[in-house]
Amino acid sequence: MNILVTGGAGYIASHTLIELLAAGHQPIVADNFSNSDSAVVGRVEKVAGVNIPCYEIDVTDYDALDGLMAEGNIDGIIHFAGYKAVGESVEKPLMYYRNNLGATLTVLECMKNHGVKKIIFSSSATVYGEHNQVPFVENMPTSCTNPYGWTKLMSEQIIQDAVASDPELSAVILRYFNPVGAHSSGMIGENPKGIPNNLMPYIQQVAIGARDKLTVFGDDYETIDGTGVRDYIHVSDLAKGHVAALDYSAEHRGYEVFNLGTGRGTSVLELVKTFASVNGVDVTCSIGPRRAGDIAECYADVSKANSILGWKAALGVEDMCRDAWRWEQNKSTM
């Protein structure tokens, strides 16, 4: 299938390009590169040995996206494009609502114009809020604590309503847990601009000497070692989940939600110690106060994705740490 990948140069999206190509699909990238690098697409082409059509457009621009979709035979869309920093969303909520919801609406409108009936949406486990008990299951109540999360949950609702109005539509919502790691080639990986918002790239920067230390937010939770527990999933496993969702959407109509995680929790200190051990490096840590809005544990029930999509995470925390470090060492030469 010809698959339009919005935000296709991003961290998760770029790994998904590789898995789409490996499965015999042809991805087409649409990205304005506001928070990514166009060179990433070229590196994916080197890894895969295949050319990828790439268009520099803003997915919120109706005319630009509609014009792109009019050019080719698009069979489906994987919609990644959107702002993604929780802290920034609190500081600039209107910017987040305008951009993220606007992108979703524009994608759905252009799909309707051109008879495209398949969409895979990049959502987040943040929609489970603060009050559900782990493991999180897809039918649990949803709520959010920040504008970024609300843009994900609102987009889910917009897509669900679009499906209700068109029985031919197939929409798969993928709720990610904590993607980490990098492609095994060392050619692509997470490369945040400025101070990392996520744990693994911060660990990487401390290990390579770019930052003095990692501050762990709280060690007094009721967990294995007092630090927060999360469901870390290798980004390549996550990317394969998108291909499984696309295969499902080719055979099914309607609206479905799937968790993508490992189903296992790993504490912050366990991840830090594993990274140091696997890679033979030091990661200096200090303990700070809890961070507002953080919960003690967050991990997935992945039985639905296992049974219906036939997908299961295959890579462990050691693989995540090893691949992340390889990428960190290589990226300055890219």
Image: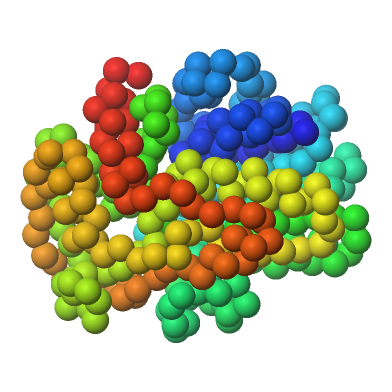
- Residue 249 lies, in percent from the top left, at 77, 51
Residue at 42% across / 53% down in the picture? 233
Q: Quadrant of the N terminus?
A: top right
Q: Is residue 184 above or below residue 150?
A: above
Q: Is residue 331 visible?
A: yes
- Residue 88 lies, in percent from the top left, at 40, 55
Q: How is the image coloured?
A: rainbow
Side of 30 relative to 2 (left or right): left
Side of 210 relative to 42 (left or right): left
Q: Is residue 152 visible?
A: no
Side of 110 relative to 301 (left or right): right
Q: How many marks?
A: 0
Q: Quadrant of the C terminus?
A: top left
Residue at 55% across / 74% down in the picture? 137
Residue at 34% across / 45% down in the picture? 320
Side of 257 relative to 327 (left or right): right
- Find residue 192 and report its image quarter: top left
- Residue 220 lies, in percent from the top left, at 17, 78
Q: Is residue 309 above or below residue 287?
A: above
Nearest the viewer among 223 and 207 is 223
Nearest the viewer among 232 and 83 is 232
- Residue 84 lies, in percent from the top left, at 47, 52
Q: Is residue 203 above or below residue 137?
A: above
